[in-house]
Amino acid sequence: MTPPQFRSSLRLADRTLDLTRPALMGVVNANPDSFSDPGHRPLDAIVEQVHAMVDEGAAVIDVGGQSGITNVPEVDPSEEIDRVAPVVEAIVAQLPDVVISVDTYKPPVVAAVLEAGAHIVNDVSGLRAPELAPLVARHRAGLVVMHTAAPPKTRLQETDLYGNVVDEVRTFLAAKVDEAVAAGVDRDAILIDPGPDFTKTPAQTVEVLRHLDVVNPDGLPALLAISRKDFIGALTGTRPKERLAGTLAAVAAVGSGTGVVLRVHDVGQIRNFLTVLDVLRGTDPVDPDLRLADELRWAAGRPDGTTPIEPSAT
């Protein structure tokens, strides 16, 4: 399966995000009930995680203040702002080159995080709030338009929900992109998201991912949130933190082309995977002097217990 190729850049207010190769979006949860890294953490710990993800290769950080878990109530916008705005401000201050996305669909939160310096609004509601797109347009920010057939925090997985899931996702996304553009959002600042697992059974998600070129005929940049997803767990019989191998397979199949932002949990592992994939798929010459560093030959140092001798600096 050849990965789809979409437009290779995303225009934001003060920068352009290069998508000639997949850009990695690290997931940072500022809420205590995430399925992937649950538990309350102080701001310093969250910012430390951001630094680590950037060091591993994340070009975008997606900050969330409310879990997508469906059996807990929505967070009040003021509490969500208290959770995410300080994280955005800290990233702006400490890592000014990093693109900041905020996972929210509530206009008060959108207004607060854009004022704080966020660059992208990752709206998982499918533009249910009419005030959201004009706010994004006012700040010349980026916008993720995601497909969903139900309000946020609603679990809806029915085998007969769609007549043709690919056609219905394509039609929905096209209409919502037009709505955002009509509200003033720059078309070159829009990412489409087919919404893996959102109001879709695993089989429906697979069908959509197999036909991303049909879902996105205009070739807009795509946000693919395929890391640790339910469809991978269903196919492999694994829990979220056991789904790296399945995530890598999904990345190779549908997320390794141009015009893609990959929303991932295991940033360093995905970067390493893409590095090797890019080299083996490519035709650029490999440096003939490429060598493995001596300290990387063994899992825990040399078998004889000695330390590799560093070459003299003189």
Image (cartoon, rainbow, N blue to C red):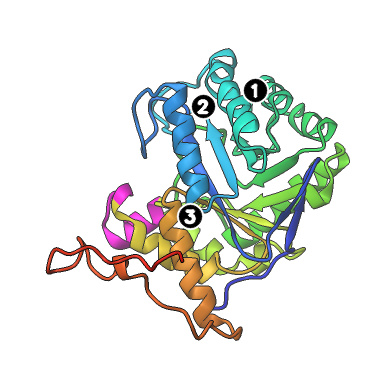
- Labels 1 and 2: the sequence-earlier one: 2
The image shows residue 6 at horizontal and vertical percentages of 70, 65
Q: Does the magenta stretch include residue 117?
A: no
Three-letter code, disc 3: Ile
Do the numbered discs 1 and 2 sit on residues whose CB atoms are within 8 Å? yes
- Labels 3 and 1: the sequence-earlier one: 1
Residue 153 has which mark? none
Q: Report which residue position mark 3 lands on.
A: 226
Closest to the observer, 196 or 46: 46
> In the figure, is residue 238 to the left or right of 304?
right
Crowding around mark 2 (Cα neighbors within 10 Å: few <14, some 14 to 19, many 20+) is many
At horizontal 50% and vertical 22% (from top left) the residue drawn is: 74
The magenta segment: 230-241
Secondary structure category for the residue under label 3: loop
Q: Report which residue position mark 1 lands on.
A: 109
Q: Is residue 237 magenta?
A: yes
Q: In this view, does 146 lie above or below 151?
A: below
Closest to the observer, 248 or 279: 279
Three-letter code, disc 2: Gly
Crowding around mark 1 (Cα neighbors within 10 Å: few <14, some 14 to 19, many 20+) is many
At horizontal 20% and vertical 60% (from top left) the residue drawn is: 300
The image shows residue 276 at horizontal and vertical percentages of 46, 73
- The picture quadrant where one finds residue 38 is top left
Q: Report which residue position mark 2 lands on.
A: 65
